[in-house]
């Protein structure tokens, strides 16, 4: 078994700090996170953007590729005033920082900007990270990208304030499933304690990001969960549970796509299945496929084989055809994986 590699080397940390310290206060700095941003992508990026402002940088912009809409749970996050649509990114920034992006494919049209930047610092925690960027702060053991962002903020001498802390807390709470997943170490709780100590109200934040949704999203969830299929014999007898959601489902309930992001959680709680698949329509014949395992399967290997990526127990890829075709592919990948 390959042990997970250690965290970023000291030279990478030093290079990142030096790259930021070398910039004048008016140098344009562009921050980027992944398409369809989640709490970790937005939280790590905006918390770091606020840290740069505290350091005296006046030209700081944050963005992500694709449609410029912020999921409602994150619409009160500090630092949103620094967020701009992809089209308004600095065309020639002196420095680019990339957050929670496992592969350049997740950068959409912004990949060229990253490639052209004189310096690009990549902060990420995906084991499947493809190795792009000139300075790499990548730690697959980190529970969230915000763990790396907070360390870099500290190395730059920026004290945590309530706004930066709220961004990092949202990121940490999102990617640990509210401090439930395996990566929830002592260090994660110590970081959470430091963040809360700035004056956060974890109950309010959790209610806002996890426990609030429109009535239509609840009804939509009911339909999607109602059509779930359990295949106890699949995945070598470890069991597979899957369901799907179409654009028509979203339209019928007048809901935006992000309401599907957390729908995998009730599905993956099914006791009779190790592997969970949620197939979400992106466009005609194109589907965002979410994979989860309880431990028997490294789903990131399945996802990578399809051009996607992720973590050992949580990964995703783009699938094509009908939902049944996508699930056929996953069944086949599971058979190959387990044999
Ligand atoms: P989710 O199922 O919650 O969308 O994603 C689970 C994990 O897999 C996340 O860490 C996410 O970044 C990663 N992931 C999901 N879809 C893709 C994809 O299409 N490509 C890559 N590289 N990673 C993905
Ligand atoms: Mn993340």
Image (cartoon, rainbow, N blue to C red):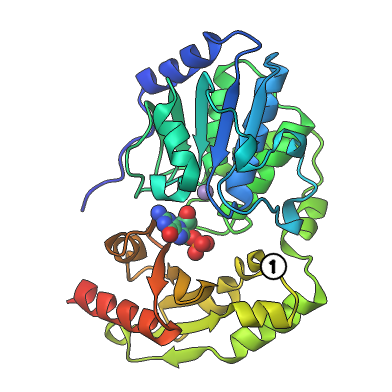
- Nearest the viewer among 321 and 204 is 321
Residue occupying image coordinates x 44% and y 33%: 114
Q: Is residue 12 above or below residue 25?
A: below
268 sits left or right of 79 in the view: left
Q: Which of 129 and 160 is in front in this view?
A: 129
Depicted 99 relative to depicted 313: above or below: above
Residue depicted at x 41% and y 63%? 313
Report the residue at 61% width, 84% height from top.
224
Residue 200, image x, y percentages: 79, 41
Query: For the image shown, how many numbered marks are present on the structure?
Result: 1
> Is residue 69 among the parts visible in the rendering?
yes
Q: In which quarter of the image is residue 230?
A: bottom left
* Residue at which label 1 appears: 256
Figure check: 274 above or below 168:
below
- The quadrant of the image that shows the C terminus is bottom left
* Residue labelled 1 has its Cβ within 8 Å of some atom of ligand 1: no
Is residue 199 placed above or below 185 in the rendered structure?
A: above
- Residue 234 lies, in percent from the top left, at 32, 87
State the residue in front, 285 or 224. 285
Residue drawn at point x = 40 percent, y = 77 percent: 274
């Amino acid at each position: 078994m390959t042990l997970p590699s250690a965290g970023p080397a000291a030279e990478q940390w030093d290079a990142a700090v030096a790259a930021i310290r070398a910039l004048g206060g008016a140098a344009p700095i562009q921050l980027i996170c992944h398409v369809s941003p989640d709490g970790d992508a937005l939280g790590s990026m905006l918390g770091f953007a606020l840290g740069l402002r505290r350091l005296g940088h006046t030209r700081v912009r944050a963005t992500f590729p694709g449609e410029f809409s912020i999921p409602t749970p994150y619409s009160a996050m500090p630092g949103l005033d620094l967020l701009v649509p992809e089209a308004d990114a600095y065309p020639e920034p002196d420095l680019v920082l990339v957050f929670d992006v496992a592969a350049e494919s997740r950068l959409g049209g912004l990949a060229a900007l990253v490639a052209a930047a004189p310096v690009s610092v990549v902060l990420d925690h995906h084991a499947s990270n493809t190795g792009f960027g000139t300075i790499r702060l990548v730690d697959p053991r980190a529970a969230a990208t915000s763990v790396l962002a907070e360390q870099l903020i500290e190395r730059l001498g920026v004290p945590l304030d309530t706004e930066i802390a709220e961004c990092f807390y949202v990121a940490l709470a999102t990617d640990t499933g509210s401090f439930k997943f395996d990566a929830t170490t002592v260090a994660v709780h110590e970081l959470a304690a430091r963040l809360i100590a700035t004056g956060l109200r974890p109950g309010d934040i959790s209610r806002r990001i996890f426990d609030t949704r429109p009535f239509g999203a609840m009804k939509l969830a009911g339909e999607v969960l109602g059509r779930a299929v359990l295949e106890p014999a699949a995945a070598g007898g470890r069991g597979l549970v899957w369901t799907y959601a179409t654009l028509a489902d979203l339209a019928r309930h007048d809901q935006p796509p992000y309401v599907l992001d957390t729908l995998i959680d009730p599905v993956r709680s099914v006791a009779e299945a190790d592997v969970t698949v949620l197939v979400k329509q992106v466009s005609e014949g194109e589907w965002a496929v979410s994979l989860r395992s309880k431990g028997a399967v490294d789903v990131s290997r399945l996802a990578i084989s399809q051009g996607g990526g992720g973590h050992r127990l949580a990964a995703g890829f783009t699938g094509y055809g009908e939902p049944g075709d996508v699930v056929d592919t996953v069944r086949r990948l599971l058979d190959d994986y387990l044999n």
